[in-house]
Each structure stands twice: as structure tokens, then as C-alpha cells.
Amino acid sequence: MKEGLFKIALLVIAAIAAGATAPARADGMDGKALFLKNCAACHQPTGKGIPGAFPALAGNKFVQGKSTDVATVLLKGRGGMPDFSESLSDQDISTILSFVRSSWGNQAAPLSEAEVMALRDVLQVEPFSNGQMSNKH
């Protein structure tokens, strides 16, 4: 039992030392800032992704397509991408997706917090709880 707790403590210390943080909340942050904190490590600040690993969001027809399809990816995950249903609020998701859908030449309509909330219901994804232990990543 003590060994398990010791290992967990070491992992937490290592994560803190590496600068790992929980995903940023919307608390006054704009879409770009939220994207940079939560998405840019994989999809890059330019939205160009990493070929063969993480898809480009810039000029992406899927990203500019049906807003509920794009939001579903954030709420349920897809391929190698984890879901963010427990780590990002409906407001965060709508803010990030609105930014992505209108950046780097993309020209798609924004997404509202109410749309994301309704989609959670349709997909039977638990409501965002804002708990400190909610980060699955």
C-alpha cells in the first residue's frame, strides 16, 4: 500500500516538475489562448498539425463542416485523440471550436455553449463537473 502511494507521489512530483498543468478553463480566456493551452501541442499553434501524427486543422473540411460533428470529437474522442468531456467545460469547448473554425483561413460559423451542452445530452456524455480530478489526460 505504501509503495503504491509513494509511486503516485513520485508521479505527481514529476508532473509538477515537468510543468504539467490541468487544461485551462475559459475564465476570461479567449479562443486562441485556450487553443494554445489545450490543443497546440499536437495540432501546433499554426493549426497545421504534424503530418502522420496529428491532423491539420487549418483548411480542414471536417473542422469547417457540421459543428456538432466537430464538437463530438472533443466530447467523445476519435482515433488517437482523447475526449475532453471531463477536462473542458461547454464554454471552453465552444470557445476553442469557434476560434478553430474561424482561424487559419477556415470560414465556419461559431459554436455556442448551449449547442455543446445540448450535444452532451444527445451523446449521453456526463455534464462538466469542474472537479480537480476530472482531467483524463
Image (spheres, helix red, strand yellow):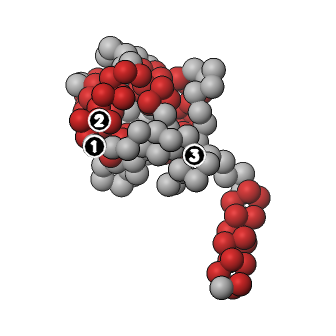
As helix, strand or loop, the secondary structure at mark 3 comes to loop
How far apart are the alpha carbons under marks 3 and 2? 19 Å
Pointer 2 local density, CA inside 10 Å: few below 14, some 14–19, many at least 20:
few
Q: Residue 131, which numbered label?
A: 3
> Is mark 2 in CB contact (under 8 Å) with mark 1?
yes
Q: Residue at x 71, y 84 (%)?
A: 2
Camera-nearest residue between 59 and 98: 98
Q: Residue 65, which numbered label?
A: none
What amino acid does circle 1 point to? Answer: Gln
Query: Sequence order check: which comes first, mark 3 or mark 2?
Result: 2
Q: Which of the 4 image quadrants contains residue 27?
A: top right
What amino acid does circle 3 point to? Answer: Gly
Which residue corresponds to mark 2? 121
As helix, strand or loop, the secondary structure at mark 2 comes to helix
How far apart are the alpha carbons under marks 2 and 1? 5 Å
Compared to residue 137, the image places residue 106 above or below, namely: above
Q: Position of residue 19 (x, y in %)?
A: 72, 51
Residue 70 in view here: no
